[in-house]
Amino acid sequence: MNLNGPPYPYTEKDWSQWYPFVSKAGRGCATELQAIHDSLQLLQGSDGDESEVVSRQKRWVSQSMLPWTIRELPGLKSDNEADRFIGAITIERGTFLYILDEDERRRRKQENNALDAGDRNIIWEVGFYLVPKYHGRGIMPAVLRTLIKHILVPYMNVHTLMATYFEYNTPSRRVFEKCGFEFLQLLPDAITLPPTKNNGITGRKVGLGVMRWQLA
């Protein structure tokens, strides 16, 4: 109930539409990342000139989306719990949910999506969730900080990362704050909850908090 999506209840049809899309994006990013690693390893110890190194390093990962699962680490739990799925985090080009004018939101998305991979002006967006029993353990701040440091900056050239949260979801806001995001604004009544997420009641609206991280 803290998420604008996915649909609830989540049906087999929802899965059949969403999983192929996110799975393809994940495989594509993994392939791009491996290609960069292979190129840099080939250059180590070679006689390649500096311009060649710079050229290869300008290959950027991800045209649109970078999805990750969050799992138990082997060795921390018993064998039947090791590698258990406990959450997910996705980096994607901005959806601009915080722009309430639909025409302006559509225009911003089109401009943002037209930028080439690696362009420092791309507005990226982060969303995540964690199985409730794992809340309060510092997992999500560690995951997000790790992604920013080791993937988003060096392999995607991310300079601006946006995030939103429902106004009552203060734990999510704290995660962003711990990772260096700044609070920008609170948009009252920005999101209308579907009845299935509001005990069958229609028309309930919630405010949307907006946060931003920028590369120093």
Image (cartoon, rainbow, N blue to C red):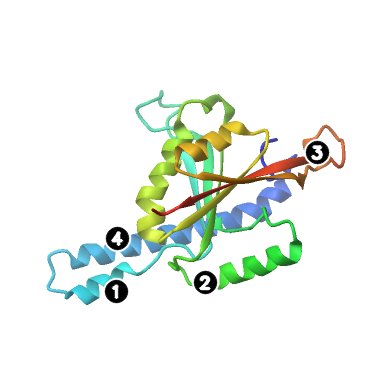
Judge depth for marks 2 and 1 and give the one in front. 2
Q: Reading the chain from its start, which is encountered first: label 4 or label 2?
A: 4
**Residues at discs 3 and 1 in contact (Cβ within 8 Å):** no
Q: Against 19, is 208 above or below?
A: above
Residue labelled with disc 2:
115
Mark 1: which secondary structure? Answer: helix
Can residue 82 be seen here? The reply is: yes
Q: Is the residue marked by circle 3 packed among few (<14), some (14-19), or many (20+) residues within 10 Å?
A: few
Looking at the rendered structure, the kind of residue marked 1 is Ser
Mark 3: which secondary structure? Answer: helix
Give the distance between the C-alpha atoms of the residues marked 4 and 3, in whole angstroms.
45 Å
Give the distance between the C-alpha atoms of the residues marked 2 and 1, in whole angstroms.
19 Å
Looking at the rendered structure, the kind of residue marked 4 is His
Residue at 47 percent of width and 26 percent of height: 137
Residue labelled with disc 1:
55
Mark 4: which secondary structure? Answer: helix
**Residues at discs 1 and 4 in contact (Cβ within 8 Å):** no
- Mark seen at residue 196: 3
109 sits to left or right of 72: right
Quarter of the view holding residue 78? top left
Percent position of residue 179, x then y: 45, 41
Give the distance between the C-alpha atoms of the residues marked 3 and 2, in whole angstroms.
37 Å
2 sits to left or right of 50: right
Q: Reading the chain from its start, which is encountered first: label 3 or label 2?
A: 2
Q: Reading the chain from its start, which is encountered first: label 4 or label 3?
A: 4
Residue labelled with disc 4:
37
